[in-house]
Amino acid sequence: GAVVSQHPSRVICKSGTSVKIECRSLDFQATTMFWYRQFPKQSLMLMATSNEGSKATYEQGVEKDKFLINHASLTLSTLTVTSAHPEDSSFYICSARDLGGDYNEQFFGPGTRLTVL
Amino acid sequence: GQNIDQPTEMTATEGAIVQINCTYQTSGFNGLFWYQQHAGEAPTFLSYNVLDGLEEKGRFSSFLSRSKGYSYLLLKELQMKDSASYLCAVSDSNYQLIWGAGTKLIIKP
């Protein structure tokens, strides 16, 4: 299947700092990428849909000024958590949809575990 | 509203068979996915159903009934490594995935 990478895999930062997470589709072009957040023992929560060359579409309740998304190319989307606070500590996962794939499924990156002290 | 229901947790014995059910109510339907997620890791794709019937892939099979809004994932010859959460997700009319909360499967020796 298609490969999606995510960097960094783990980050610990101080409260008030900003953290950037990169998501790359390695062997296919992704016009659409998705950013999820997952708290312990809970399901995936879609935060936003990232569209190449246009503004991201945010889900209700997700602050677009706090979670900045940039989809600058067909293989790269970034999520920046600005002025992070302890309640932002979570597992952030990106996915990309391979429209050329057999099932139009989403392929997931390995995730980034963010801990805000 | 849109809703995906699946059991929170199931327990099964190594070598046995287990069926994980998923019922859904969504605005539109463009297929149903099953993903496996081990603790601390991202989900990995298992199966996709868009037509009624059973899709078999090795030890895993997935069934869909669109009229009943129902699917199940069948795991045979269970192995300890199958201990994970299994996520049911439906692609709605906008091709957006609606996720269930996941079923935590515990395999006992």
Image: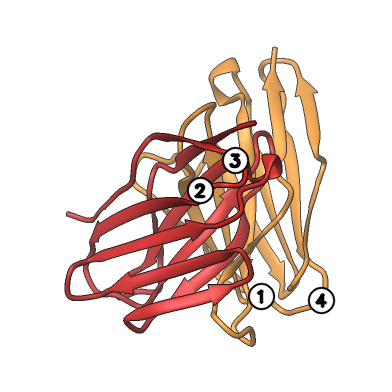
Local crowd size for mark 2, using a 10 Å CA cut-off: few (<14), some (14–19), many (≥20): many
Indicate the secondary structure of the residue bearing disc 4: loop
Amino acid type for the residue under numbered disc 4: Asp
- For chain A, the rendered hue is orange
Which disc number belongs to residue B86? 2
Q: Amino acid at mark 2?
A: Tyr
Identify the residue position indicated by label 3 in the image: B84
User: In this orientation, which residue lies closer to the viewer: A37 or B80?
Assistant: B80
User: Label 3 marks which chain's residue?
Assistant: B
Disc 2 element: strand
Q: CA distance from mark 2 to mark 1?
A: 25 Å
Residue at image location 73% in from the left, 34% down from the top: A19
- Looking at the rendering, which quadrant does residue B8 occupy? top left
Chain letter, red in picture: B
Whether labels 1 and 4 belong to a single chain: the reply is yes
User: Can marks 2 and 1 be said to lie on one chain?
Assistant: no
Foreground mark, 2 or 1?
A: 2
| Nearer to the camera, B27 or A33 | B27
Asked whether, in this view, residue A4 is left or right of residue B89, the answer is right
Disc 2 with disc 4 on a shared chain: no
Evaluate if marks 2 and 3 touch, with contact meaning CB atoms under 8 Å apart.
yes
Disc 3 or disc 4, which is closer to the eye? 3
Type of the residue with mark 3? Ala
Q: Is disc 1 placed on a helix, strand or loop?
A: loop
Q: Which of pointers 1 and 4 indicates the residue nearer the eye? A: 4
| Residue assigned mark 4 | A27
Whether label 1 touches label 4, CB < 8 Å: no
